[in-house]
Image (spheres, helix red, strand yellow):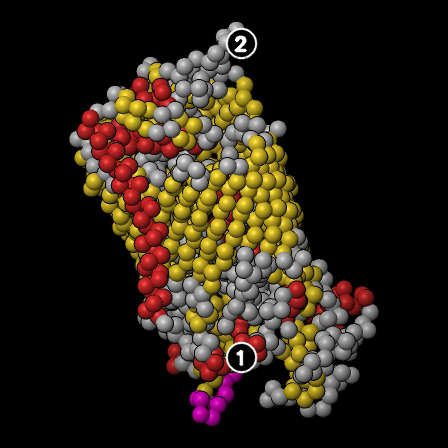
Amino acid sequence: MAPPRRRNTLALALAMLLPCAVPAALAQAQESSARATGSLTVPAGPLDDALKALARQAGIQVLYPAGLVARHRSRPVTAVGTPTAALAVMLEDTGLRAVAVADGAFVLERLPPTPRRRATPSRPVIADDNPVDVGLVTVTGTHIPRTPVDGVEASPMTRITREQIEASGHLTLFELLREQPGMLGHHPVEVAVEGGSAAQQPFASAATTSLYALGPRATLFLVDGQRVANHGLVSADLGGLTDLSGIPLSIVDRVEIIRGGSSAIYGADAMAGVVNIILRKDAATPTLVVRHGVSGAGDAWQSQASLTMGRRWGEGGDLFLGVELFDHDGLMGHQRSWRTRDLRNLRLGDWRYQLGYRDADGELIRAYCPGAVGRAARECDFDPPRFESLEPETQRASMYTSMRAPVGENAEWSAQLRATHTRQELWRAPFHASVLLPEAHPDWIPGAERLDYAFFDIGPVRNRTRGTSLDASTGLNGWLGEWQWHANVAHHRNDVTSRIQGLVRETAFTEAVRNNRYRFGGGNPADLMAAISPSITARGTATLEQFSAGGNGPAWRMPGGLAMFATGLEVLRDGLAHRPDALMEQHDVALGPQKTRIDEHRTGAAVYGELSLPLLRRLQADVALRLDYREGYGSRWSPKLGLKWNVVDALTLRGTLATGYRAPTLFELRRPGVDENYDAFPYQPDFGECRYSAAVPGLGTYCVLLRGAMENPGLRPETSSSQTVGVVWAPADRFQASLDHFRIHRRDEILPINAIDDAAAFPLSLVHDGEGRLVGINDYYDNVGESDLRGFEAEMRYRWETLGMGRFGLRGGAYFLERLERRRFPGAPLLDHAGYRVPRHSLLGAVEWHVGHWAHTLHWRRAGSVRVHAPDAPCRPINTRQGRCVTPGFSLFDLDIAYVPSPRWRMSMNIRNLFGHDPVSYDVEQAGYDFATDDPRGRYYLLSAMYRF
């Protein structure tokens, strides 16, 4: 059956490409004819599309913010001889004009206010006087402003527009980003337990994403081109991360994702790429949006209300204000049948715990769970995922304002303020552990070595997180001759308070058991329960102050045109005040890692330079060089080279070479998350003499050692090198396709290690007593890892406008991980992790149809299959027997239907997971659900209404 299926797939691909290629070829012929005859012809249509077509035909640059032309249409241009005349026709009755700022370069701006006595507006004119200020154009991946029509960059970039955001049906930035090809989601439930679903101490919930499975530390998040403060609480596994919950999606204008190393442009943390979140700066009319969603099961309710408004005053001043309220009900494991450790429906057995008394060999003597767990085929089966949150309960209130005003003739002042308050609550199963009972305790039974017990008398573990983020910036920008300059200061702050209930204070519990005061099964006095399980509070504050100044402008003329140069200076100071609960510091929380108090500040500075060099008419080079200084780690150069060769009008080859680095941050002055406990480890000659050892028949000698953790102040920066090479085919503005190959090689990765891996290589991990005998092993972070990943990315977009059937659009993106080779420490084997625990490929596509007052969008998301074991470990025997070593890939479809009866109203219905796909995971540790890729809500309905006043 496979060959016919492949033939059908090929036929479908050809059918999709034919309507793209024919109009594209006609458009290419039209543009070539225009260049040959010297006449310019552009059909009527959206102004943005027309300007891009004109720029391609005439070989000019037209600079403008995307929002300035979003609602305008262009008049047709027919056989016009000059770009100046063509622009005048296109801008008629739009309230805009084109200003010549350099040879072959124009900037669009609004016309000055017209006196009331004039009956008709002035015809747009082309000014050729001194350059005027139109504000900074936010461009990702470069400090040199680019024309929006010059859409092909040397570095691969994905742009998510406001229109796409509205049609996606997403209410949060986290949901939007984690579905992008090559992105991996770090869900707030997983972040709260520091990456391990088996952990019982939820610390603080936050949501973020990362590129290429390299983790959050390799992806840099920017807001309007600036860094922001990290989440205030430290994650032992993930380090400092950007909490996307603090950025409401209603105020986002667009998102631009630069893939590949960008340290030469933005400094540290940009080894895998950059995500630039660009906020809205203007609103033509006040707009109210109300959204409400519910799952097909009648739960997981979501509500969102946002109000945006803008006002203009004087000669170019404007104000934008946006507020948002968001409310999301939590979703528990018991609300979904597939969330369980009982995986018999997948033929993978029952992995629930049996609570009760066990002997020295671990055999169950008697079940014991009075009034706690329902009876089943086996007594006292305990299924923790049924008690745990799949989605946290969330409430958020946000406010954002942006102001701009002219200062003199050639300068502009701007300021932005954003504040968000978030509350999240998530639940874990009641605390459970194996308890060693003394024979004198009244609950002891003969032959029992331990009691596997769940503290239902304490109740579930609950984590309530409150976070407040504040971002404020102000600055000036303007023109000095032909140079554009800017200076900006900013303050960013993130405060987090995390309160945890339901954990066990180890010393109080041990004493109560020793004194026979605590009785298993309930009936204990309230004061004793309060002493055993007190409320635990952790607080954290992350701050970032920064100053930046720079300029850009023409440098010299080259064979291909005018070279452009940008240079600048950045100074920053980041701080971290991490205040865990005293019990966490004293390591008095049962089965919880010890936390460290941090109160530190660190300064840094950078200078950079960037050149855009048109070597020939069709060959351009981009060169960037940055020198970064970080207190405690010295300075480091980061170069980058990009090349773009426009072979013919429709075909461009591109490539980049770059280096990257990441200095250890204040968040990495920490110890790994290890539960201190005694365990048995195979003896190594480099252990020396062990205080406690035992010979195990057939297995050799084992040492009984205390497993702990420590900090390592000697960490060094991580380094990387990256390369991309690709091709872009754009025969017309309506169609573009690209294919890029990337490689990122990261060295000196900061990973947790210990002497269990290699005692000779990591002697600092060994802990000896006063007589030199080995008594413990400590985990710590060190620069020992190496990653080398290679893969492909592809993007395609196509728009087709018909006379009677409306406008159609196709867009899609694909990611394929060719190899992900990792070495945990020097001397360890280099293993390929591609497809292990993370999908090898992911795809995202959409089909759009706009006709009359209706807009329809069908989204498709595909996540590839995942192997459920590590590359250096065998698949579990039960998985192997049942053929369940690879969790199959899945596809989700979303449908958005919008009705726009007038310019004031827009109403839409979005159905996510249209066919009701349920998550499936063959990894028994995930209990049927992968937080990184799956959506637990099932089919989901979202109704939206937008009204413009």
Number of labelled discs? 2
Residue 304 visible within the image: yes
Q: Which residue is mark 2?
A: 116
x and y percent of residue 919 in the render? 54, 65
Residue at point 60% right, 52% down? 941
Residues rendered magenta in the picture: 692-700
- Image quarter for residue 53? top left
Q: Determine the residue located farthest toward the front in the rendered image.
A: 804
Up the image or down, 271 lies above or below 502; here it is above
Up the image or down, 689 lies above or below 575; here it is below
Q: Pick the residue in front: 900 or 168.
A: 900
Residue 190 visible within the image: no
Q: Calculate the distance from the C-alpha at mark 1 to the C-alpha at mark 2.
A: 78 Å
x and y percent of residue 107 in the render? 36, 24
Direction from residue 88 to residue 36 in the image, left or right? left
Q: Secondary structure at mark 1?
A: loop
Up the image or down, 1 lies above or below 572; here it is below
Q: Pick the residue in front: 769 or 187.
A: 187
x and y percent of residue 616 in the render? 18, 35
Q: Pick the residue in front: 925 or 698.
A: 925
> Is 541 within the magenta?
no
Q: Which residue is mark 1?
A: 347
x and y percent of residue 879 in the render? 47, 79
Q: Name the kind of residue labelled 1 in the image.
A: Arg
Q: Within 10 angstroms of label 1, few (less than 14), some, or many (20 or more) residues?
A: some
- Image quarter for residue 829? bottom left
Residue at point 33% right, 42% down? 735
The image quadrant where one finds the N terminus is bottom left
The image quadrant where one finds the C terminus is top right
